[in-house]
Amino acid sequence: MQAIFRHANGRIATVLAVLYTFVGWPVGIWLLTRPEWALNFIGVLLVAHTLVYSAYLLHDCAHNAIFASTAANDRLGEIFSWMNGGCIAAYAGLKEKHLRHHADRLDVVAFDYRAILKKAPRIVLWIVLALEWAYIPAVELLMRVMVITTPFRDGDKQAQSRMITILLIRLGFFAALAIISVKAVLLYMIAFFMMLTVLRFMDAFQHTYDVFVTRSLERAPVDPKRDRQYEYNNTYSNLVSLGHPWLNLLVLNFSYHNAHHAKPVASWAELPALHRTLYGEGDKQIIPCGALLANFHKHRVARVMADDYGEVGGAGDRTGGFIGAVGVSFLTAV
């Protein structure tokens, strides 16, 4: 019988993660509609966490790391994109842009939001910076607005029809939820913002790559410096916890980022063992999340218009100059 899953190890864990995501998301939404605030609180956390899982499971699908069949991975990835809002971009584009990130060893993005903000009226930049200061992920929202408006700016009729259909379906979902409970819609927005914040925190401190802006699926110019050693030296494993590795399951082991880049087709369940095999427990590219929380807070405004991601020190205060990335999500591509 032909294998269903790509990897023999971790099949049960992956099935459980998918089931948790598919079951936890609607249960969380139901909890948002309840009158009890305690249940609402649990619902917000459950919706936010299942949205995070949907994003990282989509990421595994893009690498064909779940099923043996590419088509099966793509179908599941598309379903997850409808959960987390990535569906506003074509799944094929999300997948290809992310694979370019690995192949070209660059942060490949569709839009240079900094250039857009520099050209926009000064009030727009002020609003974005004020929202970011208040921990509202304005840049991530701006990137999604650009994805939505691109077909209309390009005059692509087919893409316009697709976008209108997607927006009507998603607006219809929230309108139906609002009929049940307006409070639930507001709480869902909080959960969605929490998901964006978790994803952008992880993204912010996993690379010190150069940025390559392209709307197409073109390859970046070849640069000999971007070899395997460059990839390792500019990739960081921002582990949630060193002492309690199970806590990395909160982000589906996405924090084992050097291991992921060493073997992109490895499933999320294999990454801790792969990390131990390749790097051990004291690898210099490990930067625990706890050491980065202060940076995330300190540079939350400066990061928006910073020219680069800063630098990671070799000793002492390694993270003091690490500003981090923003606007590099694999969910915003065209």
Image (tube, grey):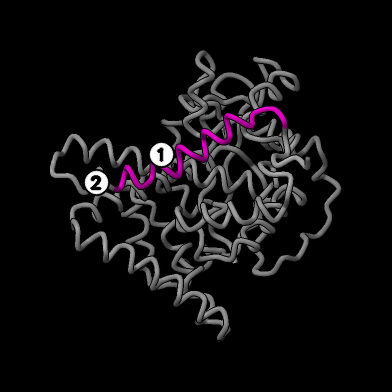
On the question of residue 326 being in view, the answer is yes
On the question of residue 211 being in view, the answer is no
In this picture, residue 77 sits left or right of residue 125: right
State yes or no: residue 138 in magenta.
no
- Residue 22, horizontal then vertical, whole percent: 45, 45
Circle 1: element type: helix
Q: Amino acid at mark 1?
A: His
Q: Is residue 33 above or below residue 40?
A: below
Q: Is residue 233 above or below residue 50?
A: above
Residue drawn at (64%, 32%) of the image: 11
Image-quadrant location for residue 128: bottom left
Circle 2: element type: helix
- Residue 228, horizontal then vertical, whole percent: 81, 38
* Quadrant into which the C terminus falls: bottom right
In this picture, residue 275 sits left or right of residue 171: right
* The magenta segment: 8-29
> Which residue matches tag 2?
32
Q: Label 2: how many residues lie within 10 Å, few (<14), some (14-19) or many (20+)?
A: many
Residue drawn at (41%, 39%) of the image: 49
> Which residue matches tag 1?
49
Residue drawn at (81%, 60%) of the image: 221
**Mark 2 and 1 residues: CB-CB less than 8 Å, in contact?**
no
- Residue 147, horizontal then vertical, whole percent: 51, 68
Which dot, 2 or 1, sits closer to the camera?
2
